[in-house]
Every structure is written in structure tokens, then in C-alpha cells.
């Protein structure tokens, strides 16, 4: 088995062009920034953030796993890479994705043009391994060492594709997926020689995605923790939100809240093994005298809400809990700092290529550039999903296939729908902090928030703002939903938004 070099992904605004350094990218699954999701990650905060840069304003290109992972890999917004949801028909690991996008990921470029040694371990795309699209035999171009999870996030009783060969794991403590990834990393470093070519390593543990399973050693470490009671937690019906959020019950019944608390603490507990993984990678790099030549990047594929606006638990909404994610980076020349400049998931592609000394067109920009603007608008896109078959949840919604992710244990509140489809522009600048969204429903419903005044998005100003302001937002959004390459970089907008 040929072992690739690992790249640890770490993003920071850097003032010079790096060439040929090692890269390690660690992608958590459903890790928010707004609800204190990073609190359990003490090693990560100290070893990456404490020695490098912490970004406060990174936003997803789409608040759901497969489309945003596609954006990370390709540097493209959803309307360009065409992975629009977590289904094969929605582009998630489809044949079209494999033929058109996989040959152009950052891994393919680094392997083919700079002869990087490449390694992938953990979750790839939600439908990876499906028999109809190549099964476990399919290894995307650009990867030397391939240990990808078949399907969506699991902690036990899962299957990996080990360089195209199926390997099944059980439910013993040593089968815990985050720990298996850590062992694969150790195996790589046992074989890697510092005289070898530089490496790219992408590690994608399942935590803290459902089913929120901690390692045995971490169970009940946070048994007294409760879900964060933000001002927008378990609200009364808010008539200024789009129809899916307004749909009852609001507030959620009190008997539901202990379940939300349990989910919150299990998510924290599942992150403890990820934090150990980060420390293990850091220590191995140090032992091999590679730390000084390696960029480590820690981020997530999307955020998560737990009870905000009386939506029990999930992502898929255009609110800060779902779209703002962590980003930490350490490495050569990166000072200890906190960065407020706005970043998008599509920027990771250009940044990784710049570290390797490459440049290819993308919808993002490397945030290692010293010219990165502190006034920027980024795009967020989401396309809702309906139920593919009649559910049997016992909820009234079982008869409406247009609704999805409805759970009787959580008051039958549905988290998605076919027309829960929207596009948003999110602007951050020294003077402005706002979001403007239009839903593709029968109302073309608008939600907009001025977060300088309304940090918890309680007051939708989409219909109360001045007409000329709304026109400018619409015009900018219209341009961004069809942009490509440099057309997608909107900076220095002046004071036209509030």
C-alpha cells in the first residue's frame, strides 16, 4: 500500500506566498461556532489557535454536508459544482461529480502538478461508496492513501474503503472511527521520511454529527451541561420568519428540552476524541521535526442549531448557528492573532494551492494574501429536500412528501422541505454586518438582518428597509448566484448597505 504525505489544512491571512509546505486539513462534521462548539476543543484551541490564527468570520457556501464539502474540495459555489444536496440525484458523489469535479480538486492539482503525497481518512461525501456510482472501488483522482467512510457519519459499525478495498468495523471500543483515523495517521508517519515529497493530509472525523456518539472513555464528561439558552432559543412563533420556521409548535413543549440538552452534551463529548486526534497529529509532527514546515487547518463543513427559533436540531437554515463555522490555522510565518476578515468555504481551495505554490481559477480567494479585504460579501446557497418515500414517524407530516426530517420525539417539527430553498449574501466590514436572503417559494420570501443591531436575528428587516436598500441587495444577490471565478469576489462595496 502506497502511503501519501498528509496535509493538515489550516487557513490564515498570510503576507507571503508559501511553496511546497506540508498541509494538514481537519474537517469536523456539523461543528458550530456560535453555540460554543469549540469549548471542548482545548488542545485544538491551544496548539493551533494559540500558535496561529483564529478566524471569527468564516461562512459556509452551503449549510449542509455534501454541498459544502464539494465547495471546500473544488473552490466552487454550489451553482458551479452542482452538488446541491446530500442525494446522488442532487450531485452528491454522482457520476457527473466524479467526471467533472473530482479531477479538479485541490488534491488532484497538488498530486499531479507538485507531486505531493496525499492522504484522506474519514467522511468524504455522504453518498460515497454507493454501488450505483462505483462503490468502494472508486478512488477519486489525486489520492495516494484512501481510507474513506462509506455513507454518512457513523462512529461504530461502519465500512471504510481502504484504497478501494472494503473493510468493515464493529462496535468494540477500538473500532471508534475517530480513533481509527488517529491510528492511520500514526501508520503514515511511521513510514514518512522528511526527505520525501511534501504531503497533503485531510482528516474528516464524524464528530459531532448525529448520532452524537462519544468514545467510551468520554461518556458523561459533560453530564451537567445544557444547551445554550440564547435569546432566540425556543421562541414563540415569529411571524417574520419563512414558513418552515413559523410552522408549529413554537415554543417547543417543555418535555422536549431535556432531549435537546442531551444532544448538546453528547456533541461536546464526541468532540473530545477529535481534540485528542489534533494533539496526536501535532505531537507526531513535532517528533518527526515536521512542525516547522507544516500548515495545520481546522474547520467544519457546516454549523448546527439546537432549539434556536424553536427548531429542535439540525442545520439547513440561513441563521448564524448554521452558517458561521470555526477556522483555525497555524504554520510557518503565521503570527498568533485573531482575524475578523470575512472568509468563505470556497477560499480553502485557493489557500491550499497557494501553500503548495499553485494557482487555479476558483470562486474564492486565498486568505494568505496580504491584500485580502476586510469588506467583503460572500454567497450562501441551499436547496431544500423533500422526503423520498412516505415516512412512518407517526407525525401528521407523514402524508406530505414535501416535508422532510420530521421527528415525533421532537414534537414533529420538520427541519426541511422541498421549497426550503434560498440564496443569501452575507457581508462583513468594519461598519457593516448583515445578511439578505430570498427564498424560492411561492412568496419569494425575504429575510434580512442587521447584525450590528440584532445579533440573534430576532427582527427581520427584509420588508421594512428602504426600497433603495432592498434593490441594492437584490442586485448584488442576483449577480452572485450566477458568478464564476473572479466575478464572485465582491469587496470594497462602500456604505450602500446597512
Image: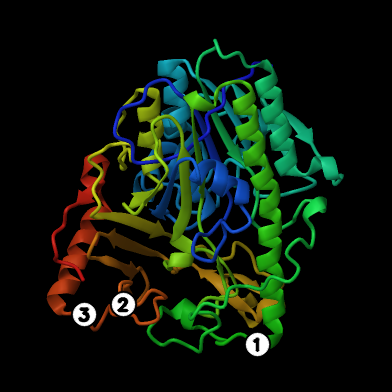
Quadrant of the image for the N terminus?
Answer: top right
> Residue at horizontal 42%, vertical 24%?
109
Q: Which mark is residue 465?
A: 3
Tag 1, which secondary structure? loop
Q: What residue is pinned by disc 2? A: 453
Quadrant of the image for the C terminus?
Answer: bottom left
Can residue 298 be seen in this snapshot?
no
Q: How many marks?
A: 3
Q: Are marks 3 and 1 in contact (CB under 8 Å)?
A: no
Q: What residue is pinned by disc 1? A: 253
Pointer 3 or 2: first along the chain: 2
Label 1: how many Cα within 10 Å (few below 14, some 14–19, many 20+): few
State whether residue 330 is above or below residue 238: above
Q: Are marks 1 and 2 in contact (CB under 8 Å)?
A: no
* Residue 394 or residue 109, whichever sits in front: 109
The reply, left or right, for residue 26 in relation to residue 495 is: right
Residue positioned most to the right: 172
> Residue at horizontal 66%, vertical 59%?
268
Pointer 3 or 1: first along the chain: 1
Quote the CA–CA distance across marks 3 and 1: 34 Å
Can residue 122 be seen in this snapshot?
yes
Amino acid at each position: 500500500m502506497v502511503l501519501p504525505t498528509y496535509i493538515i489544512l489550516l487557513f490564515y491571512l498570510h503576507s507571503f506566498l508559501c511553496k511546497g509546505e506540508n498541509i494538514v486539513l481537519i474537517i469536523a462534521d456539523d461543528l458550530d461556532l456560535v453555540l460554543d462548539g469549540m469549548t471542548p476543543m482545548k488542545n485544538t484551541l491551544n496548539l493551533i489557535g494559540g500558535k496561529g490564527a483564529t478566524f471569527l468570520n468564516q461562512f459556509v457556501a452551503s449549510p449542509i454536508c455534501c454541498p459544502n464539502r464539494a465547495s471546500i474540495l473544488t473552490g466552487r459555489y454550489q451553482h458551479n459544482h452542482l452538488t446541491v444536496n446530500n442525494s446522488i440525484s442532487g450531485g452528491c458523489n454522482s457520476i457527473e461529480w466524479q467526471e467533472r469535479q473530482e479531477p479538479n480538486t485541490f488534491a488532484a492539482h497538488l498530486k499531479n502538478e507538485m507531486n505531493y503525497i496525499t492522504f484522506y481518512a474519514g467522511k468524504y461525501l455522504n453518498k460515497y461508496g454507493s454501488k450505483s456510482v462505483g462503490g468502494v472501488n472508486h478512488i477519486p483522482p489525486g489520492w495516494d492513501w484512501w481510507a474513506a467512510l462509506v455513507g454518512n457519519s457513523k462512529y461504530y459499525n461502519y465500512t471504510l474503503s481502504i484504497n478501494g478495498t472494503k473493510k468493515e468495523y464493529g462496535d468494540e471500543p477500538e473500532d471508534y472511527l475517530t480513533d481509527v483515523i488517529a491510528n492511520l495517521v500514526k501508520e503514515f508517519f511511521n513510514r514518512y521520511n522528511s526527505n520525501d515529497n511534501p504531503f497533503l493530509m485531510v482528516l474528516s472525523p464524524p464528530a459531532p454529527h448525529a448520532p452524537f456518539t462519544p468514545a467510551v472513555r468520554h461518556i458523561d464528561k459533560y453530564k451537567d451541561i445544557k444547551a445554550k439558552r440564547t435569546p432566540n432559543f425556543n421562541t414563540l412563533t415569529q411571524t417574520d420568519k419563512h414558513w418552515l420556521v413559523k410552522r408549529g409548535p413554537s415554543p417547543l413543549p417543555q418535555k422536549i428540552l431535556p432531549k435537546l440538552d442531551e444532544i448538546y452534551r453528547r456533541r461536546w463529548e464526541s468532540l473530545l476524541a477529535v481534540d485528542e486526534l489534533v494533539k496526536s497529529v501535532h505531537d507526531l509532527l513535532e517528533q518527526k521535526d515536521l512542525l516547522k514546515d507544516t500548515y495545520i487547518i481546522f474547520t467544519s463543513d457546516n454549523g448546527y442549531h439546537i432549539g434556536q427559533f424553536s427548531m429542535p436540531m439540525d442545520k439547513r437554515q440561513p441563521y448564524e448557528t448554521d452558517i458561521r463555522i470555526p477556522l483555525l490555522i497555524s504554520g510557518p510565518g503565521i503570527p498568533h492573532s485573531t482575524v475578523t476578515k470575512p472568509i468563505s468555504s470556497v477560499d480553502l481551495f485557493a489557500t491550499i494551492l497557494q501553500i503548495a505554490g499553485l494557482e487555479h481559477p476558483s470562486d474564492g480567494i486565498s486568505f494568505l494574501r496580504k491584500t485580502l479585504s476586510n469588506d467583503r460579501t460572500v454567497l450562501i446557497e441551499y436547496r431544500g429536500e423533500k422526503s423520498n418515500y412516505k415516512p412512518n414517524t407517526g407525525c401528521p407530516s407523514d402524508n406530505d412528501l414535501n416535508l422532510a426530517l420530521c421527528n415525533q420525539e421532537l414534537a414533529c417539527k420538520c427541519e426541511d422541505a422541498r421549497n426550503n430553498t434560498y440564496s443569501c449574501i452575507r457581508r462583513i466590514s468594519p461598519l457593516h454586518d448583515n445578511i439578505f436572503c430570498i427564498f424560492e417559494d411561492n412568496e419569494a420570501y425575504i429575510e434580512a438582518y442587521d447584525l450590528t443591531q440584532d445579533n440573534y436575528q430576532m427582527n427581520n428587516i427584509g420588508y421594512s428597509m428602504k426600497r433603495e436598500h432592498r434593490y441594492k441587495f437584490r442586485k448584488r444577490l442576483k449577480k452572485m448566484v450566477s458568478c464564476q471565478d473572479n466575478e464572485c469576489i465582491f469587496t470594497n462595496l462602500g456604505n450602500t448597505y446597512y
